[in-house]
Image (tube, rainbow, N blue to C red):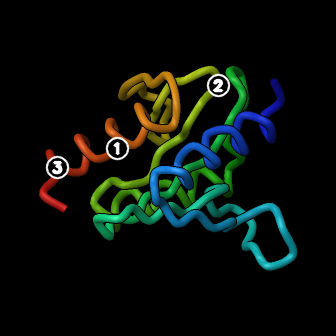
Amino acid sequence: MTEAEFTRKICDELRKLGCLIFVAAGNKFGTAGWPDRGIITLDGIMYWLEFKVADGKLSNLQHYQMERIYTRNKKLAYVIRMPGVIEDYNGKQLGTFTDGKNLLEWLKNDADKMEV
């Protein structure tokens, strides 16, 4: 599975769960360095997700933007790595997931810990 296919699969699953998903990078309207997707849940919480293949690296600009978002936005910015690993912008593994539903549950639990 390619990174694009993985991104599409997870985003389609999140959409079916009621999330609003928008493309923040990778198109003519996006801004370089921003995470691939912004996701807003039915609870009104916004997450920034950068999708990567198993050995994909953040560019320097992506790392800079993720760090800025992470430190200013209650840490709600994550690298989502194939086949199902959640990391912070420094590559520290924070958790794992099996599908979009499981990822959304993990994100919500993490946000609850931070009193978003």
Where does the image place residue 45, in percent across and percent down from the top left? 33, 65
| Residue labelled with disc 3 | 112
Q: Amino acid at mark 1?
A: Leu
Residue 91's disc number = none
Dot 2 or dot 1, earlier in sequence: 2
Which residue sits at x=41%, y=31%? 102
Dot 2 or dot 3, earlier in sequence: 2
Q: Amino acid at mark 3?
A: Asp
| Residue labelled with disc 1 | 107
Residue 82's disc number = 2
Is residue 52 visible in the rendered structure shown here?
A: yes
Q: Amino acid at mark 2?
A: Met
Q: Is residue 87 left or right of residue 53?
A: left
Distance from disc 3 to disc 1, alpha carbons, whole Å, reads 9 Å
Distance from disc 2 to disc 1, alpha carbons, whole Å, reads 16 Å
SS class, disc 3: helix
Q: Residues within 10 Å of mark 3 (few under 14, many from 20)?
A: few
Image quadrant holding the N terminus, namely top right
Where does the image place residue 4, in percent across and percent down from the top left? 80, 41
Image quadrant holding the C terminus, namely bottom left
Where does the image place residue 32, in percent across and percent down from the top left? 75, 66
Which residue sits at x=46%, y=33%? 87
SS class, disc 2: loop
Mark 2 near mark 1, Cβ–Cβ under 8 Å? Answer: no
Mark 2 near mark 3, Cβ–Cβ under 8 Å? Answer: no
Q: Farthest residue in the bottom direction?
A: 29
Which residue sits at x=62%, y=48%? 11
Distance from disc 2 to disc 3, alpha carbons, whole Å, reads 25 Å
SS class, disc 1: helix
Mark 3 near mark 1, Cβ–Cβ under 8 Å? Answer: no
